[in-house]
Amino acid sequence: MKRLNVLAVLFGMLAALLAGAGAAHAASSADPVHALRQQFAAGRGVLVSETARTSISGDKQTYIRRTTGRIGFGKSGVVGYDLTSRGVITPGLQAALPAEELEAMRTPFRAVNVGRYTYVQGFQWGPMPEGKTWVTFGKDNPSWQDYGQRGDQLIDVLSPARLRFVISKASSLRSGEYRGTLKTQNLYSEPGAFNPENHTVSFRLFVDKAGLPVRLITRYSSKEEDYTRDGEWVSRIHRNVVDTRYRWHANVKITAPPASAIVEFNDLPANRQPNFGIPLVIHPDDRAVAE
């Protein structure tokens, strides 16, 4: 009897494993690219919630930024977005940073994209003209962020072509999850000064039963030039983790801010100064030489 019981347990375990394998196959059999295309229609979109964490070599703090908002679709894909980001003030930052930097972190940063134009609020680039609360990019400055980037996420899985590329780079597949690495220079092949740098990015892409992306976690490191409080530029390694979640079947309409509240980036007072936006200050002892 004991032997029969053992065999029964073994057969039960085997059946469970086969059922699990079948469930994994079923979860991965849906075509994410096809599922994404089915969502493209005017007035539809996806809600986004994102957390980005950055640690910097030589710095004990972890910098966190949260982004929420919505991305709108048209018949052929993404036509706009409205995203708001805020820095998270941890106890460590509260103790380490001066009050003005903490205040800047508390200020919401909002970016609204409609077609070729992106409107930014909370942008720190010197004083704003009276009555203007938005800075626009798009005419002489064609892109606010890197090509295809929204928020802090480098990988655009809302583009069918790029979603297909991401899936093709998956080295392992679990139930509803793709894992792998890719290089951003292969993901964004379009020419342009605003394309992302050549980062090697590891990713975990989760899809629902219909195949739609519901969560994307990316990790990558980059070498950045940071301006220290001592007035020096130093090279540091930034290690980034970005966790983006997508909620589908939303009605989304993206509208531009009122024209009366908008100023073009090139028309900002700081950009009217010499030296590419850095005000030129002539000290009294230098006037004779300047004249």
Image: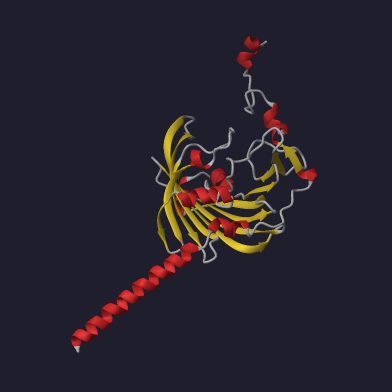
Q: Which residue does the image show at 23% across and 85% down from the upper left?
A: 5
Q: Which residue does the image show at 34% across and 76% down from the upper left?
A: 15
Does residue 266 appear to the left or right of 212 in the view shown?
right
User: In which quadrant of the rendered image does the N terminus lie?
Assistant: bottom left
Note whether 176 is above or below 116 in the view shown: below
Residue 52 percent coordinates (x, y):
50, 51
Whether residue 140 appears in this view of the structure is: yes
Q: How is the image coloured?
A: secondary structure
Whether residue 152 appears in this view of the structure is: no
Does residue 145 appear to the left or right of 43 in the view shown?
left
Residue 87 percent coordinates (x, y):
54, 50
Q: Quadrant of residue 273?
A: top right
User: In which quadrant of the rendered image does the C terminus lie?
Assistant: top right
The one of 140 and 182 positioned closer to us in this rendering: 182
Q: Which residue does the image show at 65% across and 13% down from the upper left?
A: 287
Residue 54 percent coordinates (x, y):
46, 47
Residue 95 percent coordinates (x, y):
46, 49
